[in-house]
Image (cartoon, helix red, strand yellow):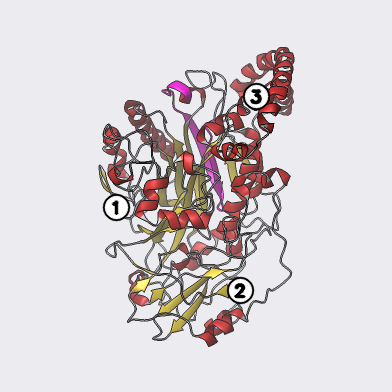
Amino acid sequence: MVLYTSPFPNSFLSVLHSFSWGLIFPCYWLADRLVASFVPTTYEKRQRADDPCYFHALCIIITTPIYLALLVASLPFALIGFLLWSPLQSARRPYIYSRLEDKNHANGATLLTEWKAAGNGKSFCFGSANVCLLPDSLARFNNVFNTQARAKEIGRRIRNGASRPQIKIYIDSPTNTSISAASFSSLVSPQGGDSTNRTVNAGIKRTTSMEYKGDNSGSNNSEDSREDKGGAGEPNEGEENTCIVRINGEDNGHMSDTETDTVNGQAHASGPAEPSLEGDAEISKTPNHKQKEGDSGSLDSYSASRESLVKVRVGDGTVDQSTVNNKLLYKASIMKKTSVRKKKHTDETFDHEISAFFPANLDFLCLQEVFDKRAAEKLKEQLHHYFEYILYDVGVYSCHGCCSFKFVNSGLLFASRYPVMDAAYHCYPNGRGMDSLASKGALFLKVQVGSTPQDQRIVGYISCTHLQAIAGDTTVRCEQLDMLQDWLSEFRKSTSSSSTANPEELVAFDVICGDLNFDNCSSDDKLEQQHSLFTHYKDPCRIGPGEDKPWAIGTLLDPEGLYDEEVCSPDNLQKVLESEEGRKGYLVYPTSKNHSSSQKGRKASLKGNGRRIDYMLYTEEGLYLEWKVEVEEFSFITQLAGLTDHLPVAMRLMVSTGEDDP
């Protein structure tokens, strides 16, 4: 299948489309600014409360007539542009595929060779987030604003989090049963590839704080180095850059002063650090992007998350463990008095946490609500510093392909470090209300993640979707889940080039990511909870219909509290969500007739851990029979605090192939 690198099949249609949109855009922009001026966010309300001269009210009185006059003057041009724009959408392609042009930073092909060296398997990391990048006037109804600046900052935080260096510290202290929360940074036991040794029994894993200015080099850090294969053990694939520090002692798992000084003294970089991207003036004006002391969200502060582990680059070639430990490229501050807590739910087979960072070595990213086209371009530019392959502007416009008129696209965006082989998009035809104005649907992708020594392609399937949002539309969402399964089955059949007798491709994983707009605990969502999708796909956070695992938390934040001091930074939000009382104050909970509509004042009556409407699902059906897929880690991420009203989620899957490749 040919991937579409431009929205139209020829340059003439592209020029005509640009011309028509140029006629529409002034009217669109003026209307957006006019509505936005009357929809303040809670942050703006607090600022204006301190304004004794009512300066903002005066500005609105002056600017409103100007906006209205210009809006009326631009309407004739917008009408002409619309008459040209609308019929052009019948020739528009359903997405734009973008591949990084800089060959120095493009290394997706290199990743494909890693599978042959993996031996007994390889891990893959998936992330999903609803980023609320609507036109500014509409975004304000979710209590977020400054869409263009937010898009740039969201992209910067994601790729900085995914490409950050990482240090793993294992503290061998059999007498100490306390550990800090599991982290994506502590995936691999230092005892080797044996999956039974990935648990805490191999030693206490403790996270640390660090100083880190961000990696803006535009390269995938995971390709810059390789671990020693003959040291203390062979880490799982995907952990190539990990520096493993073994700490032995009886001091309750803490490092000695001498050891701490030794680590602190090794803060030597291999070369001059490239300066991190600085926010423009527009960003500095918004609370979403102010970096305070201790705010590690964009990795530009000197104090990073207390629960974050950082990878360290080491040179290519064979090095022993002691050499790696003595060549830390970034200063690690080992906190002697770090607060620790008992690890709960020890019967769980995989690690789980609330993390202030996106996981290092993030392989695939699925985003929802990237509706604004200008914001999508800014977001894509930032993500291309880490992801080589991106599909954006996904969806249809006008009346093409769906039953009702579509004013905006689907809002879906997909980014990958691995080559995309095929892609397909389908629009849900049964959207209702405001949702019917967007071409919400499902994006299906086939990616190549490796090859066997017999040159068989190893592929994976990823689906990204966003379902009907209006509460009470249970039937609509169930119909969309039915269509999602049917379309995915058709996509797999149409893109498969294998037969049972002579497989040319081996399927390693099949994952569904997205905002499904229902949770697994609300009594109003019982139909969705019992849908057949959950008989074929597994939800790592779910026990069964109506019951989540105790550690799972809601992913929908209370919009009214986005700018509170307690949660306005990734570190602060992480700390708040780790406590039950904090979750009750800042997460949206299932509605009930017995509860008042206000989130505040009803904390005592709230049950559960909030509405979890963002999902990561995987299946073991339809994969290569001799391989086993299991979850290694699941994470709720706070790195986008203040930028969106959703918590991103991430999941790492381990594809175990046995000792030898097939």
**Residue 586 visible to an observer of this rendering:** yes
Q: SS class of the residue under badge 1?
A: loop
The Cα atoms of the two marked residues, 1 and 2, are separated by 37 Å
Mark 1 is surrounded, within 10 Å at the Cα level, by few (under 14), some (14 to 19) or many (20 or more) other residues, namely some
Residue that appears at 46% across and 81% down: 246
Residue type at mark 1?
A: Lys
Query: Would residue 29 appear left or right of 333 to someone viewing this image?
Result: right
Task: Measuring from the top left, give residue 451's x and y in whole percent.
Answer: 50, 58
| Quadrant of the rendering where the N terminus is positioned | top right
Q: Is residue 101 above or below residue 148?
A: below
Q: Which is nearer the N-term, disc 1 or disc 2?
A: 2
Q: Nearer the viewer, residue 167 or 394?
A: 167
The Cα atoms of the two marked residues, 3 and 1, are separated by 45 Å
Residue type at mark 2?
A: Lys
Q: Which residue is mark 2?
A: 331
Q: Which is nearer the N-term, disc 3 or disc 1?
A: 3
Q: SS class of the residue under badge 3?
A: helix
Task: Measuring from the top left, give residue 638's x and y in whole percent.
Answer: 49, 52
Task: Measuring from the top left, give residue 294's x and y in whole percent.
Answer: 57, 61
Q: Quadrant of residue 315?
A: bottom right
Q: Which residue is mark 3?
A: 34
Q: SS class of the residue under badge 2?
A: loop
Q: Are marks 1 and 2 in contact (CB under 8 Å)?
A: no
Q: Which is nearer the N-term, disc 3 or disc 2?
A: 3
Query: Would residue 653 appear left or right of 61 to someone viewing this image?
Result: left
Q: Which mark is residue 549?
A: 1
Q: Quadrant of residue 75?
A: top right
Mark 3 is surrounded, within 10 Å at the Cα level, by few (under 14), some (14 to 19) or many (20 or more) other residues, namely many
**Residue 497 visible to an observer of this rendering:** no
Residue that appears at 60% across and 79% down: 264
